[in-house]
């Protein structure tokens, strides 16, 4: 009887790009909309408001890219150092490393004899890969990818930041601030729901969470703009 194998797709394969994409888009919307609302509260002309928004988009995208690259690169450096150390230990003390791997499988519920057999067979096939996966928790799905994280964050930040800018361009003068705020909060709600759905999390809770923090950021920035605009 033929055995039919199928490859299951789990949501963990999306963690890397989903995290960077959601963080970038949310930050792009919230920071740019808050900046524009704060500047508008200081009674700045539309041209100055749009200039502030564009400057915020460029600066924010570069900041996101640099921050993600540095952060994820640090993680990648740590992973490389751990793998180099593990490779040296496998070269100098392979028997000890096999016992260590077998003990991990025993802690997960395998009988000692079976754990020894599994450890021996896995190490014969790919010793470093087995230890990277089961001892260090490093695998191809979750390992650090600095360039991917930086590019995704910068791109999604830019896309997110364009939305309040477009709302400011299209809205009539008296409705400029409400249009920026409403458009931004609606998109944040949709984005939060989509991200939650993609990751298998509760949609309503995620949407309300991002809307709350986005609204709070705009309110506080508008208050700061009103206060310092009156002083200046």
Image (tube, rainbow, N blue to C red):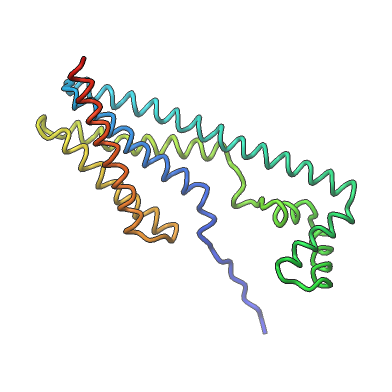
Q: Position of residue 11 (x, y in %)?
A: 50, 59
User: In the shown orientation, is residue 110 left or right of residue 38?
Assistant: right
Residue 15 shown left or right of residue 224 in the figure:
right
Q: Residue furthest bottom?
A: 1
How many marks do you count on the picture?
Answer: 0
In the depicted structure, whether residue 188 falls above or below residue 31: below
The residue positioned 27% from the left and 22% from the top of the image is 51
Q: Give x and y (percent) for residue 118.
A: 79, 67
- Residue at 32% x, 59% y is 204
Relative to 190, does residue 215 appear above or below in the rendering? above
Q: Quadrant of the N terminus?
A: bottom right
Q: On the image, which quarter does residue 229 sit in?
A: top left
Q: Position of residue 133 (x, y in %)?
A: 70, 55
Percent from the top left, x then y, of residue 74? 62, 35
Q: Residue at x 12, y 35 (%)?
A: 175
- Outermost top residue: 232
Assign the C terminus to one quadrant of the image: top left
The image quadrant that residue 34 belongs to is top left
Q: Would residue 217 be found to the left or right of residue 232 on screen?
A: right
Q: Nearer the viewer, residue 190 or 219?
A: 219
Q: Quadrant location of residue 75? A: top right
Give me the residue at 17% from left, 23% from top.
46
């Amino acid at each position: 009887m033929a055995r039919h194998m199928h490859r299951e797709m789990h949501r963990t394969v999306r963690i890397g790009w989903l995290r960077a994409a959601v963080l970038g888009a949310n930050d792009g919307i919230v920071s740019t909309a808050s900046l524009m609302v704060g500047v508008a509260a200081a009674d700045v002309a539309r041209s100055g408001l749009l200039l502030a928004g564009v400057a915020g988009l460029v600066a924010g995208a570069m900041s996101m890219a640099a921050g993600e690259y540095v952060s994820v690169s640090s993680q990648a450096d740590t992973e490389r150092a751990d793998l180099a150390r593990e490779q040296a230990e496998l070269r100098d003390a392979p028997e000890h490393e096999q016992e260590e791997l077998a003990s991990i499988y025993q802690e997960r519920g395998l009988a000692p004899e079976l754990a020894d057999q599994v450890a021996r067979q896995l190490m014969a096939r790919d010793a470093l890969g087995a230890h990277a996966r089961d001892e260090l928790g490093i695998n191809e799905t979750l390992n650090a990818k600095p360039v991917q994280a930086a590019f995704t964050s910068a791109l999604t930040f830019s896309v997110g930041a364009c939305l309040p800018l477009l709302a400011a361009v299209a809205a009539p003068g008296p409705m400029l601030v409400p249009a920026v705020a409403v458009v931004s909060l609606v998109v944040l709600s949709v984005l939060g729901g989509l991200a939650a759905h993609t990751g298998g999390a509760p949609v309503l809770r995620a949407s309300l969470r991002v809307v709350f923090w986005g609204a709070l950021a705009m309110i506080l920035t508008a208050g700061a703009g009103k206060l310092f605009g009156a002083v200046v």
